[in-house]
Image (spheres, grey):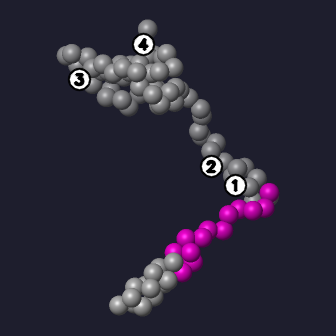
Amino acid sequence: MKTLSTLLLLLLIVCNSTFSQRTPVSSESGKKRLLASGIFQGLKFRSIGPALTSVRIGNFAVHPTDRSTYYVAVASGGVWKTMNSGTTWIPPV
């Protein structure tokens, strides 16, 4: 039984190391071609709410009558408001 367990463990290690390796893009021309292909062309940096500003939440408040509106205060000093259950965030005025 011990030899069977050892064989299975060895087979698992060999299979894992064989099938989990990927070939990275190593050449500079390959990296430039990947970035110049326009994959990221439509993406723009934007502030989307408390996850981008800070990962530490200081306080959280839900509107008493509208459950889809709530406020989040982050540790960096910003306050964010959502009126659609967290899909989009805006700084309250």
Three-letter amino acid code of the residue under disc 1: Leu
Q: Which mark, by number, is residue 39? A: 2
Q: Measure how far apart labels 4 and 3 are at the Cα level.
A: 17 Å
Can you identify the residue that label 1 sits on?
Answer: 34
Give the alpha-carbon distance from disc 1 to disc 3, as whole Å. Answer: 44 Å
- Eyeballing the image, is 93 above or below 35? above
Give the magenta-colored segment's residue range.
14-28
Residue 21 in the image: state x and y as whole percent.
60, 70
Q: Residue extending furthest left?
A: 65
Q: CA distance from mark 2 to mark 4?
A: 34 Å
**Tags 2 and 1 touching, CB below 8 Å:** yes
The answer to which of 6 and 65 lies nearer the viewer is 6
User: From the viewer's perspective, is the residue at label 1 or at label 4 nearer?
Assistant: 4
- Name the residue carrying label 3: 67
Name the residue rendered at 47%, 21% in the picture: 75
Tell me which label, 2 or 4, sits earlier in the chain: 2
Q: Is residue 62 left or right of residue 5?
A: left
Query: Is the Cβ of the residue at disc 2 closer than 8 Å to that at disc 3?
Result: no
Number of other residues with Cα within 10 Å of mark 3, as a class: few under 14, some 14 to 19, many 20 or more? few
Q: Determine the residue located farthest toward the right in the rendered image.
A: 28
Residue neighbourhood size for the residue with mark 4, other residues' Cα within 10 Å, grouped as few (<14), some (14–19), many (≥20): few
